[in-house]
Amino acid sequence: MIFTVPCTPDGASRWTQTSALDGVNFVLTFDWNQRMGRWMLSLADSRGGAIRSGMILNVDVPLLRGVVDSRRPRGELVVMDASGAGDLDPGFSDLGSRFLLLYLDAAELGR
């Protein structure tokens, strides 16, 4: 299945949340990089141990591609443009509204 990972900044330029992916809790930290004008995501295990840091949230890019850490989620994270335009990446105020963080679970990917 494909799930929407709730992530709405509500005006914050940095926040951390715990999200269950394939039934396992992960810590997600979202950071707005003002200089780049991009959102970045860091993924950690439930104890806060870094799995992958500094992933730039670009539309239609598999964020976990190439991550071989055995603690990683079994599925894949990807950002989708809900408007269907596909002409931009998430800006400061539209992550969680126009742009959604999706999780394709292991079953969806046949794993």
Image (cartoon, rainbow, N blue to C red):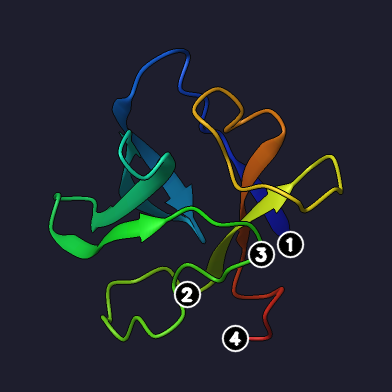
- 3D distance between C-alphas at marks 1 and 3: 17 Å
Identified by mark 4, the residue type is: Arg
Amino acid at pointer 3: Asp
Find numbered disc 4 in the image and state the secondary structure of the residue it sits on.
loop
Mark 1 lies on residue: 1
Residue name at image x 66 percent, y 40 percent = 99
What distance separates the C-alpha of mark 2 from that of mark 4? Answer: 7 Å
Residue carrying label 3: 60
**Of pointers 2 and 3, the one earlier in the residue sequence:** 3
The amino acid marked with disc number 1 is: Met
The local crowd at label 3, few if under 14, some if 14 to 19, many if 20 or more residues have their Cα within 10 Å, is few
For marks 3 and 4, the one nearer the N-term is 3
Structural crowding at the residue carrying mark 2, measured as other residues with C-alpha within 10 Å and reported as few (<14), some (14–19) or many (≥20) = some
Say if mark 4 contacts mark 1, CB within 8 Å: no
Residue 14: quarter of image: top left
Lateral position of residue 74 relative to residue 27, left or right: right
**Position in image of residue 108 (x %, y %):** 72, 73
Label located before the other in sequence (1 or 3): 1
- Mark 1 vs mark 3: give the one in front: 3
Question: Amino acid under label 2?
Answer: Arg
Q: Which residue is mark 4?
A: 111
Which residue is found at the position 78% from the left and 53% from the top? 86
Name the residue: 61% across, 31% down: 96
Q: Is there CB contact under 8 Å for labels 2 and 4?
A: yes
Residue extending furthest toward the top:
11
Q: Which is more N-terminal, label 4 or label 2?
A: 2
Q: Nearer the viewer, mark 3 or mark 4?
A: 3
